[in-house]
Amino acid sequence: MYFITCIFIFLAINVAEASPLVYGNRVLTEDFVKITEALDGIQVGNCVEVNTTLPLCDTEPALPAPSHGLKLRFVALGRGTQNYTCSSSDGSASPVAVGAAATLFDASCLVSNSPTIFHELPSAMSKVSTDALGLFAVLLGQMTSRTSSGLILGEHYFTSTGDPMFDLRIGGHKDWIQAKKGSSVPAPSQLSSHSKDGGHNVPWLKLGFADGLGIREVYRIHTSGGQPPASCKGQKESFEVEYAAEYWFYG
């Protein structure tokens, strides 16, 4: 599990907002020890059963609960960009959301075994490049399971008609959903000691079903980043804002 520990120590450095080479940083050292102990022996991905509860009480108001009869199928960490356009580059216009694109990393095992660490990861992942995370996921998936599809669960993007898509077929599953707009609540201003400014975080969502297979509802929670600037002043016609979030899939 040493490779796994190294990856999560790398993420912990970002969470702690500290230099990796600060001598005598007792708090950072203690964080490393806690993470190492929590992750030692934990299966990293490809859990069949997800044993955890969706945390809906962190916002006011709370998002609606999953519909009756649905079961939690997958939990993912999404890392990508929220995409915007500007009609002009002065302060009179506001950015307009035109979708998103993100890689979905399998986190079903981690949330089942260590939800506290899991909920801290979006804040850390929003500061790590998607290329680095993708490489870590591929290597870690190969080292932890020779028969699994790895830790890249799927991809999230928007169709040409502006509908949010979550396609898990890239991860070897049959499941996919073209979702539709549902409920939205502002991200909490203080979810943790590592994510203090909820104003920069995109809202928490519950998305409904428009088309697909296996998945009926999607939650986006514990968001980090993604909000555009208040105006288009100085912005390009099209631009992206980095973000990370948890995605919970029910079916």
Image (spheres, helix red, strand yellow):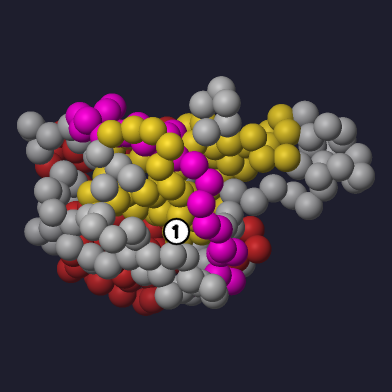
Instruction: Give the image location of residue 81, x and y in percent.
Output: 55, 39
Name the residue located 31 percent from the left edge and 74 percent from the top edge.
30
Name the residue located 12 percent from the left edge and 42 percent from the top edge.
144
Q: Any magenta on residue 148?
A: no
Name the residue located 39 percent from the left edge and 49 percent from the top edge.
218
Name the element at disc 1. Answer: strand
Instruction: Give the image location of residue 84, x and y in percent.
Output: 68, 37
Is 94 located above or below residue 142 in the figure? below
Return the residue at label 1.
221
Q: Any magenta on residue 188?
A: yes
Front residue of 79/184: it is 184
Instruction: Give the image location of residue 248, x and y in percent.
Output: 34, 53
Residue that protrudes farthest toward the top in the picture: 160
Q: Please identify the quarter of the rendering in which residue 167 is found.
A: top left
Front residue of 24/107: it is 107
Is 15 located above or below residue 80 in the figure? below
Instruction: Give the image location of residue 185, x and y in percent.
Output: 56, 63
Q: Please identify the quarter of the rendering in which residue 118 is found.
A: bottom left
Front residue of 183/223: it is 183
- Circle 1 packing at 10 Å, graded few (<14), some (14-19), many (20+), is many
Front residue of 245/28: it is 245
Q: Is residue 246 visible?
A: yes
Magenta-tinted stretch: 165-191
Q: Please, what is the three-letter code of the amino acid marked with disc 1?
A: Ile
Position of 14 compared to 36: left or right? right
Q: Please identify the quarter of the rendering in which residue 160 is found.
A: top right
Position of 44 compared to 224: left or right? left
Q: Is residue 247 visible?
A: no
Q: How many marks?
A: 1
Position of 41 compared to 244: left or right? left
Position of 83 compared to 130: left or right? right
Name the residue located 26 percent from the left edge and 47 percent from the top edge.
251
